[in-house]
Amino acid sequence: MATIEVNQQKIKFNENDYLNLKSLLPKLQKEFPIDQFQIAYFKVNGRNIDLSGESPELIRPISRADHIEIAFDKNKDVVNEIMSDVNDLIDRLLGKIAQCSNELKNDEVLIAQVGLGQVIDGVNTFIKAIHHIISTKFSAEESDLPIKELQIHLLSIMKAISNAHKVQDLIMLTDLLEYELKDNLTQWKILVIPNLRKIL
């Protein structure tokens, strides 16, 4: 029976289920999606195979004697793109928070509510993006950066904003936006994002 190692781990594999080596790739890419992983190397019997070319190795039947080695790396390009998007998102959120706070101070409640909805949606997107970056690259607990603390604080701010909005406490809502949320996002921008970029 042919053997296959993915990231140096042997996996169960029946060569009769596949027409050739090329037909094996879609199965592997279900487990290692191309938007998150890239193939570092693909070897058959110790020889590197160029997946971008038309190597005859790719279209020949898999032999019982074949030893296939594949390594997947985290896709750094995707994570770096997300990091850049996160930085832009923080800038837009800070601008929207300032605008929303001014509208609340000027008693333009209906206009402010539209902006508040956009802020909440933006923060939710930010939370998901940061979670993806951290879970893809490393554990927040292993980092010297105050990631876990800022995440917990951000979630508590969002809960407080939701409560203040429900009871229409506009003064509390303005304070939470202008001071708490603005400060939290600024700390992400100054302390965490630049250092995450260096790590990555």
Image (spheres, rainbow, N blue to C red):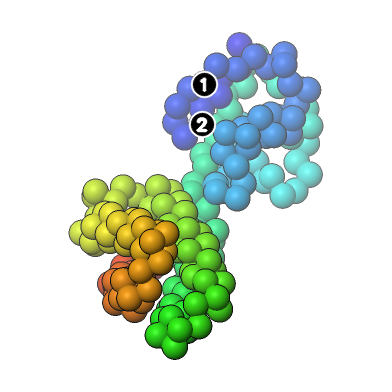
Is 32 on the left-hand or right-hand side of 135? right
Quadrant of the rendered image containing residue 70 = top right
Residue at the spot of label 1: 11
Label 1: state its secondary structure: strand
Kindly identify the amino acid type of the residue bearing the numbered disc 2. Answer: Val
Quadrant of the rendered image containing residue 66: top right
- Residue 171 image offset from top left, x and y in percent: 33, 76
Q: Is residue 147 visible?
A: no
Q: Is residue 117 above or below residue 156?
A: below
Q: Please, is residue 169 above or below residue 158 in the view?
A: below
Q: Which residue is drawn at the image coordinates 55% and 48% (left, top)?
A: 36
| Position of the N terminus by quadrant | top right
Query: Which disc is residue 109 wearing?
Result: none
* Farthest residue, direction top: 1
Tell me which residue sits at (52%, 53%) in the image: 75
Earlier-in-chain disc, 1 versus 2 = 2
Residue 124: x and y in percent read 47, 58
Residue sitting nearer the eye, 90 or 60: 90
Secondary-structure class at tag 2: strand
Q: CA distance from mark 1 to mark 2?
A: 7 Å
Q: Which residue is mark 2?
A: 6
Q: For the residue carrying disc 1, how many other residues have a C-alpha within 10 Å: few (<14), some (14-19), or many (20+)? A: few
Q: In the image, what residue occupies the spot 72% across and 13% down? A: 16
Residue 3: image x %, image y %? Answer: 56, 19
Answer yes or no: do the residues labelled 1 and 2 have beta carbons within 8 Å?
yes
193 lies left or right of 4: left
The one nearer the camera, 50 or 153, is 153
Residue located 38% across and 61% down the image: 167
Asked if residue 141 lies left or right of residue 169, the reply is left
Task: Please name the amino acid that badge 1 sits on.
Answer: Ile
